[in-house]
Image (cartoon, rainbow, N blue to C red):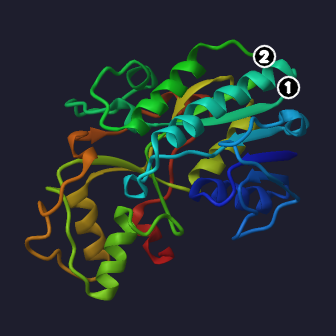
Amino acid sequence: MKISILGTNGFLSTAIAKYAISKGWTLEMYGLQSPNDHTCDVFHLVNLMNSEMDCTSLLDSDLIVYAIGAGIQANLKEGYNLIYNLNVTAPVTICNKLKELDYKGCFVTFGSVFEMGATTEQRYFTEQDVLTSLCPAPNDYTVSKRMLSSFVSSYKHDFTHWHFYIPTIYGAGENPKRLIPYVVNAIKNDEELHFTAGDQVRQYVHVSEVPRILDLALSKSLPSGIYNIQGSETLSVKEIVTKIHHAMGKEVPAGCFGSVQRADAGMKYLALDGTKLKNAIGFEAEKSIEDTLNDY
C-alpha cells in the first residue's frame, strides 16, 4: 500500500501521514518543506505557486491525498492569488493530469462546510445542500472551495475520486489561535478571553477521524463522489467555551462574549449530515472534545 500526500506540515496532512506510518504504508510527501513531526519514505520538493507539478511520480500510488490549501485561517491574511491557486487551479490541474496519464488509484480532495455560506437555516446539511448553496459567501476561501467542489461534481474521470466536505477539525497541533487551543491556553495561563456573541453553531470532528475514513473508504471500495464527514458534536461557541471551562474546573468569566467581531459570525449554523458516508462505509465519529482536551 502506497500513499502520496500533497502538503507536508499542515494540520490535516500531518495526521494522515502519522496514521499511514502506523499502518506500515509506504509514504511519499510533496511540499515546500520536509515533514517536521514525522518521517516519510520519500520527500518531493514542490512549489505549486511557481510551477505545474509533474504527476508521473504519483502514478504508482494507491491513494493520493491533496491536503494543500490556503485561506482557512483569516489571521494569516493570505493573498487572493495564493488562495485561488492552491484551492482551485492546482487541484484541478492535478485531476486533469491524472486523467491524462491514466491513473488507476484513488484521489482525495477536501471541501468545507463553510461552502454553505451565510445560511439562516438550522439543520444538518446534505452534500447536495452544500454543493448548490447560493447563500452569501463571506470570504475568498469559501468561494474558492465552492469552485473546486463544483468542478469535482461535474468532470469526467476513470480513477476513483473522493471529495469530502469536512466540518471544523480539531486536535492537538492545530493553530493555537483557533477556538479550542485558544480557550485551553487562556485558562492555563490565566489570561482574559474575548469572543463574538458566541451564538454561532459549528460541528466538530477530531482530526484523527479523517485518516480513519480514508482507510475505511479503501477497504470498502467507496465509489467516487462527494461525501459529508459528520462530526460527533454540534455546538455553539458558548457551549464549547463552557464545556472546556467546566472540564478544567473553571467557570466562564463574565463579559467575555460580544467583545470581538469575526467575518464568519454571519454563518450562524454549519453542520453536515453524514448519512450518505455512514451508509456507504459505516463511518461514525467517535471522539468528543472533552475526551481529547488532555492532548492539548
In the rendered view, tell whether residue 239 sits above or below residue 80. Answer: below
* Nearer the observer, 14 or 245: 14
* Nearer the observer, 31 or 60: 31
Q: Which residue is mark 1?
A: 104
In the rendered view, tell whether residue 295 sits above or below residue 79. Answer: below
In the rendered view, tell whether residue 197 sits above or below residue 184. Answer: above
Q: Give the CA distance from mark 2 to mark 1.
A: 7 Å
Give how far across and how far down residue 20 sits, in percent.
76, 55
Give how far across and how far down residue 83 sits, in percent.
50, 40
Which mark sits nearer the N-terminus, 2 or 1?
1
Q: Is residue 207 left or right of residue 91?
A: left
Amino acid at the residue labelled 1: Lys
Q: Is residue 159 left or right of residue 131?
A: right
Q: Secondary structure at mark 2?
A: loop
Q: Is residue 72 left or right of residue 26?
A: left
Give how far across and how far down residue 54 sits, in percent.
83, 36
User: Are the two marked residues, 2 and 1, in contact with CB atoms closer than 8 angstroms?
Assistant: yes
Q: Determine the image quadrant of residue 191.
A: bottom left
Task: Evaluate whether residue 272 shows in this view.
Answer: no
Q: Residue at x 33, y 33 (%)?
A: 124
Task: Evaluate whether residue 258 shows in this view.
Answer: yes
Rate crowding at label 1 as few (under 14), some (14 to 19) or many (20 or more) other CA atoms within 10 Å.
some
Q: What numbered label is drawn on residue 158?
A: 2
Q: Secondary structure at mark 1?
A: loop
